[in-house]
Image (cartoon, rainbow, N blue to C red):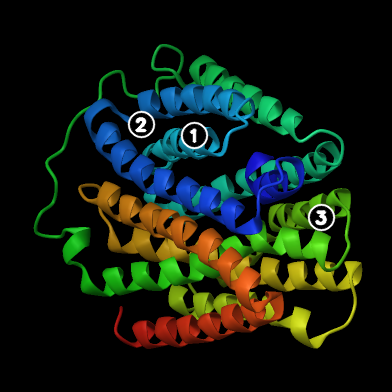
């Protein structure tokens, strides 16, 4: 609930500028990078179960504390700590999915995890918009308590003492230096392109909500509905689409189309009239683009990894999204403030076109 409404919270409730709000979201991204690196190392050392448990618990506590902060420096500090705790969870969670799944259903397992995330996103977005219209601070309490609740659920269901599938003791494996992700040149190119794509994608949750409210004069409740629509459609359709498309073409083929649709979802604000209907239509385009791109991005990096180096590939992929969180909110907000939102939407559309070309060229050089 908190993250998609953080920019609105800072600008409308705390009365900071959109530029200051963008800096806070960039700090969130910096914490995410650190969290991904630390979480990956700790997962290798202590195991995925322990890191998931403590990341959820500490992340929940950070949500509760951040909601009580009023000074800008303290908001920045606890935003960083919150993001660090939250993103330490991601490498451990990716490792857990690989552990609990089988090779023949691994892609669907990761997609099922995305379905769960988007179900939570749809409910959180709808309730978050309703709650934000009345009291922004309640968002922090609800997010914090649900994080802590998730930690308790994890402990009660998947602890080694209660689930035989969870290893009692973490077995360390030597890193695969010969097939290191850091030496996989096509994958490094893929990661760079993913950073750029994630940069455009994060505008949905930082600058676009502000545009909805300030320029399209939509209410926070309606913005929450639009955000929830994304999660609902993904929950209903993504697994069906993947089952029909998976294995028929290279993953990068679908990613290209997904990226182009994402770019178009921003450009439509400059070429079509309307307010609420236009926002819904743009979200439909963006959602289709997301369903064609993100699941197959997971398929691509999983396909290039093995049991010995999967943590490296997962870490780089997580860092790509975290790096975009640093770049996207701050620069996107700054561009909107200096040159206007219409320029920003053309700029994002142009980047997506270049990214699509990049993925298309990469497809020719990968198996």
From mark 2 to mark 3, how far is it between C-alphas? 35 Å
What is the distance, in whole Å, between disc 1 and disc 2 at their CAs?
19 Å
Residue 48, numbered circle: 2
Left or right: residue 269 versus residue 92 is right
Q: Can residue 261 be seen in this view?
A: no
Q: Please identify, in this view, whether the residue under mark 2 or under mark 3 is nearer the observer.
A: 3
Which mark is first along the chain, 1 or 3?
1
Say above or below: 268 vs 22: below
Dot 1 lies on which element?
helix
Residue 28 point in image, percent of width and height:
49, 46
In the rendered view, does 336 fall on the left or right side of 107?
right
In the rendered image, the quadrant that contains the C terminus is: bottom left
- Of 268 and 158, which appears nearest the observer? 268
Residue identified by numbered label 1: 82
Q: Position of residue 98 (x, y in %)?
A: 38, 44
Q: Tag 2's secondary structure?
A: helix
Asked whether disc 3 touches disc 1, contact meaning CB atoms under 8 Å apart, the reply is: no
Instruction: Identify the mark at residue 223; answer none if there is no mark.
Output: 3
Residue 141: x and y in percent read 68, 25
Rendered residue at 58%/50% (across/down): 114
């Amino acid at each position: 609930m908190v993250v998609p409404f953080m920019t609105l919270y800072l600008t409308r409730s705390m009365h900071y500028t959109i530029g200051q709000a963008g800096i806070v979201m960039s700090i969130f991204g910096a914490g995410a990078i650190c969290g991904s690196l630390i979480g990956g190392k700790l997962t290798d050392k202590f195991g995925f179960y322990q890191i998931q448990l403590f990341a959820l618990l500490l992340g929940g506590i950070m949500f509760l504390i951040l909601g009580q902060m009023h000074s800008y420096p303290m908001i920045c500090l606890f935003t960083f700590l919150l993001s660090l705790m939250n993103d330490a969870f991601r490498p451990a969670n990716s490792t857990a999915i690989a552990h609990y799944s089988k090779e023949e259903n691994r892609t669907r397992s990761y997609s099922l995890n995305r379905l769960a995330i988007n179900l939570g996103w749809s409910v959180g977005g709808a309730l978050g918009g309703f709650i934000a219209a009345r009291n922004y601070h309640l968002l922090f309490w609800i997010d914090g308590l649900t994080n802590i609740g998730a930690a308790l659920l994890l402990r009660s269901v998947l602890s080694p003492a209660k689930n035989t599938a969870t290893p009692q003791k973490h077995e360390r494996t030597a890193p695969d230096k010969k097939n290191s992700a850091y030496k996989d040149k096509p994958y490094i190119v893929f990661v760079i392109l993913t950073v750029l794509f994630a940069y455009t994608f994060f505008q949905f949750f930082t600058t676009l909500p502000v545009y909805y409210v300030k320029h399209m004069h939509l209410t926070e409740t309606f913005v929450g509905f639009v955000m929830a629509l994304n999660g609902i459609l993904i929950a209903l359709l993504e697994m069906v689409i993947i089952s029909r498309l998976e294995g028929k073409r290279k993953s990068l083929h679908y990613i290209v189309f997904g990226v182009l649709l994402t770019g178009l979802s921003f450009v439509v604000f400059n070429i079509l009239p309307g307010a609420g209907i236009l926002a819904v239509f743009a979200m439909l385009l963006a959602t289709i683009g997301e369903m064609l791109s993100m699941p197959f991005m997971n398929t691509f990096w999983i396909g290039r990894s093995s049991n010995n180096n999967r943590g490296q590939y997962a870490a780089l992929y997580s860092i790509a999204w975290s790096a975009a969180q640093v770049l996207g909110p701050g620069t996107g907000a700054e561009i909107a403030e200096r040159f206007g939102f219409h320029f920003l939407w053309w700029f994002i559309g142009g980047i997506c076109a270049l990214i699509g070309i990049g993925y298309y060229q990469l497809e020719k050089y990968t198996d």
